[in-house]
Image (cartoon, helix red, strand yellow):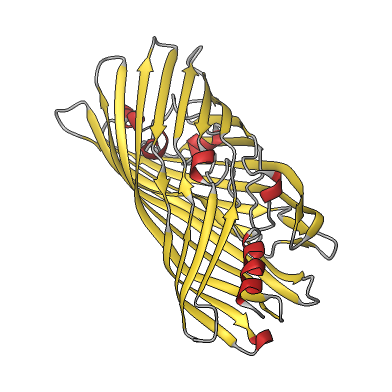
Amino acid sequence: MSINRLHILLTTVGLSISLPVAATNGINLIGFGAESTLMGGADTAVARDTSALNTNPAGLAQIHGSAFDGFGSLLRTTDLAHEDALNDKHADNRYTLLAGGGYAQSIENTPCTAGVGFFTQGGAGAVFKHINTVFGTNDEMTSLFGIAKITPGFGCQVTDKLSLGASVSLVYASIEQNFFYDTSNTVFAGFKNEGASAVRFGLKLGAQYKLDDAWTLGASYTEKTELPLTDGTAKFNFTGTGLGIVTYNNLSIKGFALPREFAVGAAFKPNQDWLLSAKVNWINWADAIKDVTTTAIDANNALAPQAIVMVSPQNWHNQVVYALGAAYTYDDLTTLYAGYNHGKNPVPERNSSPLLAAILEDHITLGFARQLNDTWKLTSGIEYLLPAKVTYDSPIFGNDAEVRNEGIFFHLMLSKRL
């Protein structure tokens, strides 16, 4: 197999090995913390718990005393599937567990509250253990990706009506991939990518303005965070050409980023029992995910290609997300929540992939909060990820390949206030 022929084949495969997510608004979750999520992500003008660090840090100013929130989410995929002429397979990883939490404390003799939180920003992945390939084999294709943040920040009540806030995040991302690793012949070499990761800083700014007793406005800005994944290793199966397994000790995957975002929202409280909220969020995916370049160098076999470079055009579209939420005070101890979130799939059809399940567009949420005693509260609910599918043509999977996604999130948060 010539080096040029190998390079063409690997570039083609690279089109199908990009970012694998089972997230919602692109690679982002629709909300953070139970109340934010159960109101459909309509949180910009409402943010009032420690998840404000990752939604609108100005909302921290609403916390007086100390606050702790610990939350977890379990995703059950009901139809994360790949279909082509040879397959109709559901992903083998049906469950994904996400977690996070935060602590905030008002600062004595100041109008400010400071806090720190841990958040799973998005990602998950797809594992297909038994795919029939065009090479006559049955093999695995897997891609696991995750983004997490440690986020300190503060919010201050600047005037009776205006609060401002900011947070700085330490963002960590990692990815592992397996594409038909046990398949090898004169025209194809399966591979594994392991250990590539990135650590970068992110910034969010926020404001809330109380017009009167009924209306509150909110806005937040999130700066773009580049996520160059480096310091990984790649293994290519060249046994079909007699070279055996070749390890590349320097792997990088560059071209991913958390996008720049700008959100505006309004909250309306018509009486003591109801809280209604809306948010519009512009997400600049077109600048965040364009061309993804995978580079593997430093091979342990001098006869193998010494550098493998795969460029995968992604060219995501910008996304506008619309969120609506409602909270109803049922009694002195119980609050009921409902929400809806919509954002058009930002991934161009031609760049779709069974390992790129970021095609979800609509989400419905329902839940409740129950005050357990004077200090502890339990918030729980579900998020239904409505079915979505994309049909596309692929040099690997043929014409009219299909990726489908549908799932249910179970959300739980335990909160303490002093």
Q: Which residue appears farthest toward the bottom when viewing the image?
A: 242
Q: Is residue 15 left or right of residue 328?
A: right
Q: Residue furthest left?
A: 109
Which quarter of the image is occupied by the N terminus?
bottom right
Q: Residue at x 53, y 55 (%)?
A: 292
Q: Which residue is at the front of the view, 417 or 397?
A: 397
Q: Nearer the viewer, residue 142 or 323?
A: 142
**Residue 59 screen position, x and y as percent:** 36, 29
Q: Quadrant of the C terminus?
A: top left
Write the residue at 49% across / 77% down: 306
Q: Which image quadrant for residue 68?
A: top left
Q: Quadrant of residue 237?
A: bottom right
Using the image, determine if residue 120 lies above or below residue 48. Answer: below
Pick the residue in front: 71 or 172. Answer: 172
| Left or right: 247 as drawn, with respect to 184 | left
Residue extending farthest to the right is 85
In this rendering, is residue 34 above or below 45?
below
x then y, percent, for residue 183: 70, 79
In this rendering, would 271 be left or right of 186? left
Q: Is residue 180 visible?
A: no
- Residue reaching furthest top? 212
Q: Is residue 372 among what the camera can see?
A: yes
Tell me what residue is drawn at x 66 percent, y 38 percent.
361
The image shows residue 211 at horizontal and vertical percentages of 39, 11
> How many numbered circles are shown?
0
> In the displayed structure, does residue 92 sit left or right of residue 324?
right
Question: What residue appears at the point 65 percent right and 47 percent down from the top-left corner?
Answer: 408
* Residue 184 x %, y %: 69, 80
